[in-house]
Image (spheres, rainbow, N blue to C red):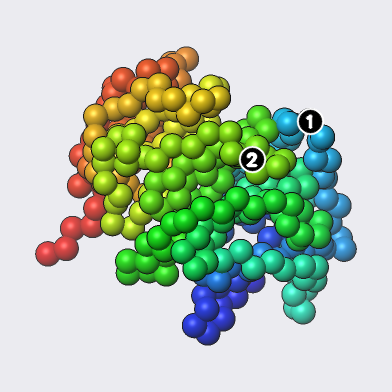
């Protein structure tokens, strides 16, 4: 078992060093991160391939890294093979733990850095941790509501790493671009102010999708922000926001983005956001008679 429940506190998250994390992290997003504790486990029979964290602003991402929600292929699968399928009966060794607050955020791992999010006492925090020691490298904290309607609340999106930057989204719509090494704010926008769409019932929860110079988010409309400035590049018409993340795909040599909000499944052109297909989301809901 990689996860265990604790009475009244929710599951604990067990995290493996980068070589293993690519295989483990796909399951993380489906489990609670309440009073979230991260464990780094080093298994004696596993040789981990680790990339040194560069002193330069941009860290090279290799096939062992997990830089975004659902991994490098955006489908929850990994190319990694050097990992242990079965743990001993006594369980894997716990090397460190770190409390990061309440939330449903998963983790992203590049080299020897790990990023996640949590909430405590009216504040959201973006955490950067050292995967070898669990020590805090930096944090970025800002005021935010817990947004705990019918659940425990806290951030629901996962930080995205790209080209030396971290992109995060909070439940109230705080979207930040942070320097991956220092946590310095490079730019930020507030989604309800940008789009005019109110915060959804359970808060904004989608993770950022980076495509070239675009940062793409479900914000009610599907929107594209300039990766360097946060300026709005394009947006679709307004929809009722969903809780998922946009996914890229290619068809006939053309790059497209798919997103499922509370109104429709959309397929748009990645270059300008033009909607090329739209299917009513009622097709994906359970019918109760």
Left or right of 273 in this view: 254: right
Which residue is under mark 2? 184
The foreground one among 109 and 193 is: 193
Question: How much space separates mark 2 and mark 1, taking CA atoms?
Answer: 15 Å
Q: Is residue 156 above or below residue 31?
A: above
In this view, the residue farthest toward the top is 253
Residue lying at 50% horizontally and 60% vertically, measured from the top left: 123
Q: Secondary structure at mark 1?
A: loop
In this view, the residue farthest toward the front is 143
Could you classify mark 2 by the number of other residues whose Cα lies within 10 Å: few (under 14), some (14-19), or many (20 or more)?
Answer: some
* Lower position in the chain sequence, tag 2 or tag 1: 1
Left or right of 79 in this view: 259: left
Q: Is residue 97 above or below residue 283?
A: below
Q: Quadrant of the N terminus?
A: bottom right
Residue lying at 82% horizontally and 63% vertically, measured from the top left: 43
Residue 65 at x, y = what percent? 70, 42
Residue lying at 31% horizontally and 20% vertically, measured from the top left: 274
Q: Quadrant of the C terminus?
A: bottom left
């Amino acid at each position: 078992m990689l996860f265990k429940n604790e009475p009244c506190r929710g599951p604990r998250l067990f995290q493996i060093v980068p070589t293993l994390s690519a295989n483990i992290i796909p399951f993380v997003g489906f489990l609670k991160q309440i009073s979230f504790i991260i464990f780094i486990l080093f298994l004696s029979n596993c040789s981990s391939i680790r990339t040194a964290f560069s002193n330069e602003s941009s860290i090279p991402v290799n096939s062992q890294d997990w830089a975004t929600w659902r991994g490098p292929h955006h489908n929850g699968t990994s190319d990694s093979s050097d990992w242990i399928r079965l743990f001993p009966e006594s369980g894997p060794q716990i090397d460190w733990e770190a409390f990061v607050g309440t939330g449903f955020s998963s983790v992203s791992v590049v080299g020897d850095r790990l990023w996640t999010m949590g909430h405590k006492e009216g504040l959201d925090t973006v955490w950067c941790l050292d995967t070898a020691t669990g020590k805090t490298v930096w944090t970025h904290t800002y005021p935010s509501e817990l947004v705990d309607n019918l659940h425990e609340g806290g951030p629901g999106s996962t930080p995205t790493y790209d080209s030396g930057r971290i992109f995060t989204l909070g439940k109230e719509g705080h979207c930040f671009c942070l320097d991956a090494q220092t946590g310095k704010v490079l730019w930020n926008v507030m989604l309800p102010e940008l789009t005019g769409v109110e915060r959804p019932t359970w808060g904004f929860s989608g993770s950022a999708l980076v495509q070239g110079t675009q940062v793409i988010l479900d914000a009610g409309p599907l929107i594209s922000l300039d990766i360097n400035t946060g300026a709005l590049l394009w947006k679709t018409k307004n929809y009722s926001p969903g809780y998922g993340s946009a996914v890229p795909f290619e068809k006939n040599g053309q790059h497209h983005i798919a997103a499922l909000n509370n109104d429709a499944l959309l397929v748009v052109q990645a270059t300008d956001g033009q909607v090329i297909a739209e299917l009513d989301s009622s097709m994906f809901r359970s019918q109760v008679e």
